[in-house]
Image: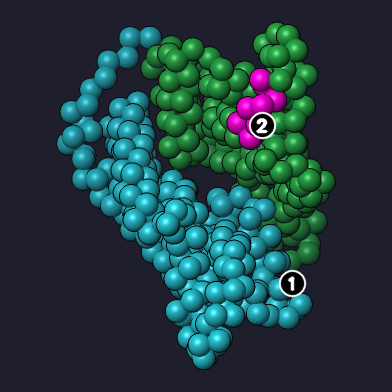
Amino acid sequence: MLDAMLYALPFLMEGLWVTIEVSFLTVSISLAVGVVLGVALIYGPLPLRLLVRLFSDTIRGIPILVLIFFVYYGFPAIGIDLASFWAAVTALTLFKTAQVIEYVRGAVQSIPQGQTEAAMAIGLTFRERLTNVIFPQAMRRFLPPWINGVTDAVKGSALVSLLGVTDMMYSINQVIGRTYEALPLYILGAAIYFIINYSLSALSRRLERRFSFVQA
Amino acid sequence: MGYDLHFNVIWRNWDKLWGGLLLSLELAVLSIGIGIVIGLTLAVAHVSGNRWVRGAIATYVEAIRNVPLILLVYLVFYGLPQAVDIRYGATTSFVATLSIYAGAYLVEVFRSGLEAIPQGQLDAGRAIGLTPWQRFAHVRLPAMTRITLPALSNTFISLFKDTSVASVIAVPELTWGAQWINLNTFRIVEAYLIATAMYLVTGYVLLFLLRRLERRFRIARHA
């Protein structure tokens, strides 16, 4: 069993790199887009708010696996032909963006209305209110669930193996295809995913404890 | 460019999608049922157990929650039979996996539900002479059910979406149905358009029904 694991490890590390790449791209793009859309959902004009709400509710209602297939196989029909890697990243990013939008909404709305009113009273502009009053406080509410959500991105990235992207999940199956030793490899793979995700969720819990003095 | 949509092949193979949807729902219902049993048992064990029991339960919860579902599905279906001498089909294997997966999420839900019951209610139960079992069945359980209902319905809907992963071991659920149509007719855009719509509509119908149920059983905050 140990032999099989040692044999597989170099292949898995190559796959792990792709897993990290996919997760990193997903997490960073969705953070940027999600924060903008989240702010639009709270402060934007009604049509924009409805549009963002529709986007978020639709995306979150579709299984990630179906979303991945849809982007990869369905988008070419409307002229968007993405390589499997980018199709996977796009699908996961769409899903994660919808999540970030909800985290932002929850965090910002947890800030008492009085804060905004006070900021208006001392004559801050909209941008100043956001960056100097609302965001610094909302950050404490946003960070723990968001970091915890990064583990979802890492776990979700395993689905990209179904498009033939050679991430860690795919590498595991490739090695099993050669050695026929399924159990030790799946256990090894589970252990690697566990180490990454457990560290992330432990970090999230620590932050949550640290910020727990904030009571809304 | 210039892709023409032809939905007639979809309607001709409609049974693949409709049957798939029903199986998806069935998988989700079975898994949440078994998951509730696992979750509730472990939550009670966690609340009343010693340090070792708590440690074991925490290990189970963390081990499951930090590993991708697709890996667990492969592990149970392809990996486990190499070690233990049991035979099972893909559907059974998936239900087992998803139940264990659901259980890990539900332990936390039930545990916080149990802890949210005011101590005064349990003391009151003791004061009127209820046995520990009666206190559990008539005081803790009903109160906890009401507290945990919203989290339970969210878990159910997310399990319904997770059933799509069963397609990787060829369980003929909705996503597999869409794949089947693609493989046999090459109408992939139509297949996934319809399957996606079916997931969305079913998900929101479920959400609507469950929210009504929650309202009905909500603990009255205002007298």
Chain A, colour shown: green
- Circle 1 marks a residue in which chain? B
Q: Position of residue A83 (x, y in %)?
A: 56, 22
Chain B, colour shown: cyan
Which residue is at a point 41% across and 66% down the rendered structure image? B33
The residue mark sitting in front, 2 or 1, is: 2
Q: Is residue A3 above or below residue A132?
A: below
Query: Is residue A183 rendered to the left or right of residue A203?
Result: left
Q: Is residue A67 above or below residue B163?
A: above
User: In terms of image quadrants, where is residue B12?
Assistant: top left
Kind of residue at badge 2: Ile
Is residue B9 a member of the stretch shown in magenta? Answer: no
Q: Is residue B139 above or below residue A69?
A: below
Q: Position of residue B55 (x, y in %)?
A: 74, 72
Q: Which residues are magenta?
A: A108-117
Query: Is residue B38 rendered to the left or right of residue A192?
Result: left
Q: Position of residue B28 (x, y in %)?
A: 40, 56
Kind of residue at badge 1: Gly
Q: Are marks 2 and 1 in contact (CB under 8 Å)?
A: no
Q: Position of residue B191 (x, y in %)?
A: 31, 32
Q: Quadrant of the C terminus of chain A?
A: top right
Q: Which residue is mark 1?
A: B55
Q: Which residue is mark 2?
A: A111
Label 2, label 1: how far apart the Cα atoms are:
37 Å
Q: Could you tell me which secondary element the residue under label 1 belongs to?
A: helix
Residue A197 visible? The answer is yes
The crowd level at tag 1 (other Cα within 10 Å; few <14, some 14-19, many 20+) is few
Which residue is at a point 70% across and 66% down the rendered structure image? B58
Is residue A114 a member of the stretch shown in magenta? Answer: yes
